[in-house]
């Protein structure tokens, strides 16, 4: 991490929690956890409330779909940490029926429905160009996504356009896949709070 | 259905108006990506436009300009949330234009 405070300036209770995580998971504490636990009143607390609502709040998108959106947005932002983290969660949420890495590498041939595909294309444009217009939204609606589904997808997009930027800016360490698998189990069981 | 409007509003209010090590004007400038001078301003601009290009030297330059690590932490968070907020607002406006509904 590029800021030492994010690695080592947590309070005693948080450091004890990190030690427990390392023992129980037998993996290093992910840098995203260190970030949200550092001065949590400033960023981690309020941001976790946003992300929990976006990723686990009521929606007709499945949890797997929303985690795949997160991985897809990370892919668009070239954020390696978030790609690996949320691909692992999406894969686990989907089960064996879909291969997330293949879906990410070729959206055109991915075995996903037209509403999700059109939504992802809109999210990619928004993430790359920082703007979309009414015609972009009409295309997603014409593909079968509801207005509420678009709204829900934009919430995911907001969260991961924040988190991905922070991961890259603070220089999150990218650990082995076992660490991401442990993180994925936790996020599916407990969510983002 | 999920709705982040209230939680997003609370996040933005906290980082811009609550207690912090960077001044409220510095945090607002980073959030807006407008008006933060020197290396911290350059860092905020990178975070907003292409965070994957941020390198160690950007952080070092911000520190050497006199910003503490806590101030840089806040500036980076504000820049990231600000950019994502502008994107989200633009997309919600486009959705409203397409559907004619709030």
Image (tube, coloured by chain):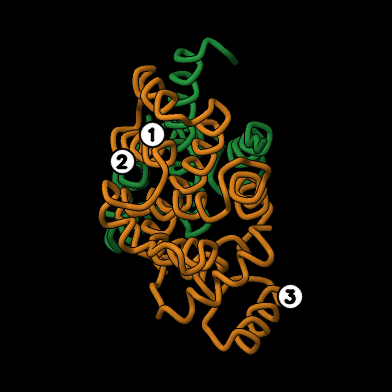
Chain colours: A orange, B green
Give the SS element for disc 2: helix
Q: Position of residue B2 (x, y in %)?
A: 65, 38
Q: Are marks 2 and 1 in contact (CB under 8 Å)?
A: yes
State the mark number for residue A13: 3
| Quadrant where the N terminus of chain B is found in the figure | top right
Question: Furthest residue to the right?
Answer: A13
In the image, residue B98 sits, relative to residue A129, either above or below, namely above
Where is residue A14, by image quadrant?
Answer: bottom right
Check the residue under mark 3 and report the chain it is in: A
Residue B17 visible in the displayed image: no
Which residue occupies 40% across, 20% down? Answer: A138
Q: Which residue matches tag 2?
A: B49
| Quadrant where the C terminus of chain B is found in the figure | top right
State the mark number for residue B33: 1
* A11 and A79: which is toward the camera: A79
Same chain, labels 3 and 1: no
**In this image, A25 relative to B40: left or right?**
right
- Structural crowding at the residue carrying mark 2, measured as other residues with C-alpha within 10 Å and reported as few (<14), some (14–19) or many (≥20): some
**In this image, A152 relative to A70: left or right?**
right
Q: Position of residue B4 (x, y in %)?
A: 63, 36
Which residue occupies 64% across, 84% down? Answer: A19
* A39 and B49: which is toward the camera: B49
Which residue occupies 36% across, 24% down? Answer: A139
């Amino acid at each position: 991490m590029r800021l030492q405070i994010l690695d080592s300036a947590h309070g005693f209770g948080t450091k004890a929690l990190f030690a427990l995580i390392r023992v129980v998971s037998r993996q290093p504490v992910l840098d995203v956890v260190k970030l949200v636990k550092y001065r949590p009143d400033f960023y981690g607390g309020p941001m976790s409330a946003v992300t929990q609502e976006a990723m686990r709040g009521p929606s007709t998108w499945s949890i797997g779909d929303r985690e795949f959106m997160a991985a897809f947005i990370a892919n668009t932002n070239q954020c390696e940490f978030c790609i690996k983290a949320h691909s692992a969660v999406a894969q686990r949420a989907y089960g064996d029926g879909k291969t997330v890495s293949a879906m990410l590498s070729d959206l055109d041939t991915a075995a996903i429905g037209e509403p999700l595909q059109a939504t992802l294309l809109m999210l990619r444009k928004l993430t790359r160009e920082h703007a979309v217009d009414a015609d972009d939204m009409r295309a997603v609606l014409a593909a079968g996504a509801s207005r509420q589904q678009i709204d829900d997808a934009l919430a995911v997009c907001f969260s991961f356009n924040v988190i991905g930027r922070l991961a890259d800016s603070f220089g999150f360490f990218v650990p082995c896949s076992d660490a991401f698998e442990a993180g994925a189990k936790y996020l599916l069981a407990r969510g983002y709070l | 259905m999920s709705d982040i409007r209230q939680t997003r509003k609370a996040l933005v209010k906290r980082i811009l108006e609550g207690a912090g090590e960077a001044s409220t004007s510095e945090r607002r400038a980073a959030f807006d990506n407008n008006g933060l001078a020197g290396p911290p301003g350059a860092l905020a601009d990178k975070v907003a436009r292409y965070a994957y290009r941020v390198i160690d030297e950007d952080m070092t330059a911000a520190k050497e300009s006199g910003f503490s690590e806590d101030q840089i932490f806040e500036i980076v968070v504000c820049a990231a949330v600000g950019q994502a907020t502008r994107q989200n607002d633009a997309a919600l406006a486009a959705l409203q234009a397409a559907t004619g509904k709030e």
